[in-house]
Image (tube, rainbow, N blue to C red):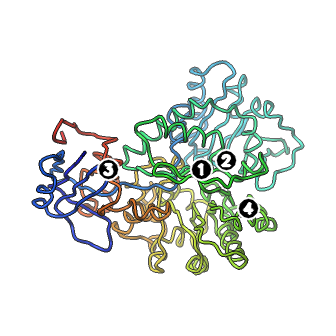
Amino acid sequence: MNKILFFNGTIHTMNNANDATPEAVLVSDGLVTEIGSLKELTKLAGGQAYLMDLKGRTLMPSFSDNIVSPSKLGEFSLHSLNLRGVKNIKELQQKIEDYVKNLKPGEWLVGRGFNEVEMEEQQIPTCDDIDVIISDRPVMIFRSCGHIAVVNTYGMRFSNMEQGLRNPKGGTYGRNSEGRLNGIFYETAIDKIIDFFPLPKKEKNVNMIRAGWNDTLSKGITSACDSGVVPSLATAYVEAIIKSKKRVRMTIIPNANTTLRAKHSYSTEKINNDLLHLNSYKYYLDGQLSGKTAAISEKYLDSEDQGALRIEEEIFYDLIYPMYCNDTRMSFHASGDEAITLALDTLEALAKVHDTEVRHRLENLTMLTSKHIEQIKKLNVDLVLSPNDIHDFGPCYRKYLPTNLIDGMLPLKSLIDNKIEFSIGSNGPLAEDVNPFVGIKAAVVRKDKEGELIGAKEAISVKDAMYAYTMGGAKVNGEVDKKGSIEKGKWADLIVLDKDPHEIQSDELDTVVVEQTYIFGALVFSKGNVSKGTLVFN
């Protein structure tokens, strides 16, 4: 029997039914078996346990991040040009020119992370900016939000783009003053390029997933959700789970927008086990507020634009009706208030024609209104929000959105006041750092990367933010009886922190470091040393 006795530290169980802070936790064969006094648990361990002396550190349940993509994290670190933080087009061009030297002839160059709000020109680059340095291969670079891409002329020719193309439903082809394509693709228009993008080999996908898992485990995330995946990536996840020793518990949600377009069908087969959930489909209803592609009821500042719905309101009910009546779980990306309204109104209408116990999921919710909150109270839905967006994209919100919309965005306190439970996650790799404590800090202090307040009245406590990242995540996964808190009989998915988040200044929350991560009681990440018989820190 494998036993670990954790003691001599602060223990946060995240069990709201019992706020007592225990002296020790005993883990046996992957489960939490006892919680209580050190004397009692030492006796129960019978001298057969590894002794985990926390030395004043903090033990808590690990994080469930229901909006992070390990595959994209791995792709970003292994196979993509990092354009975060570029200050002008010249710097962007230099990074592209340097990166292409490491590529094979004809290989696609893919980059991600630029943000025109942080650039001197205050505008999105065009194909002309790339063509002057790269003309012998396709180049595709994504804005930080992932919903806008820039493609060079070679890439557009390769993808069979024609000047006379009409904008697709739910997307836009950017054009210059003369009406010619300028290489900027918005929302569903990106699909035109992606259709010609080379599919990576399965082993490459598996390697990306493993790299992403290394990142999430180092941040204390043991449960993740990759939402909106294509079939080949779903297959790679299954193989990675089978073959990898250091696994993250995964929820995989196929992209309904692309899967159904390609296959004209959907699978009713479901997978639900301790390591993998594959039981739902995702619909993208709009884009991201930071890039002015989310569908909102007011105009973006200095613009006649209000974003756009990726799926027309007239067909949405009929589109999801078969899945709903077949009790197939669905997830809806809805960032702007118009997209959220479409999702909630449609679910309300469907609830009148079919009774279901399936909890559908809404994610990326940013502009929830009081009316939306009243609807949610009546519906059987799960909510996934990302306070990391406040930190990363606050400057974009302040530039592009009216003040009244900023003041009410990500209304976490209002949800709590209305007794609505929710999950928070990082939104990585859109987020610069998937560290949960960056998101927790943003939920608590409501400041962006420049120190400016974003919707301060919706700030919540450290305790509530940590609960949303642990028990909130477990509830979205339908696993509250298995994880999310340190309770007898639950999985020993645990993390050890270098300091207690409750005992430091709120502005210092993002300095909390995960020292160790456990899944099923097995150590899968450590910053310290592990010696036989006793687990100790440096």
- Say which amino acid is labelled 2: Ile
Which residue carries the number 4 mark?
Answer: 309
User: How many neighbours does mark 4 have within 10 angstroms: few (below 14), some (14-19), or many (20 or more)?
Assistant: many
Which residue carries the number 2 mark?
Answer: 148
Q: Position of residue 327 (x, y in %)?
A: 66, 65
Q: Position of residue 190 (x, y in %)?
A: 72, 45
Looking at the rendered image, the disc whose residue lies closer to the viewer, 4 or 3, is 3
Gap in angstroms between the C-alphas marked 3 and 1: 38 Å
Q: Secondary structure at mark 3?
A: loop
- Say which amino acid is labelled 1: Cys
Gap in angstroms between the C-alphas marked 1 and 2: 7 Å
Q: Position of residue 128 (x, y in %)?
A: 73, 34
- Say which amino acid is labelled 3: Gly
Nearest to the observer: residue 199 or residue 504: 199
The residue shown at (18%, 50%) is 54
Looking at the rendered image, the disc whose residue lies closer to the viewer, 1 or 4, is 4
Which residue carries the number 3 mark?
Answer: 30
Gap in angstroms between the C-alphas marked 1 and 4: 16 Å
The residue shown at (20%, 59%) is 10
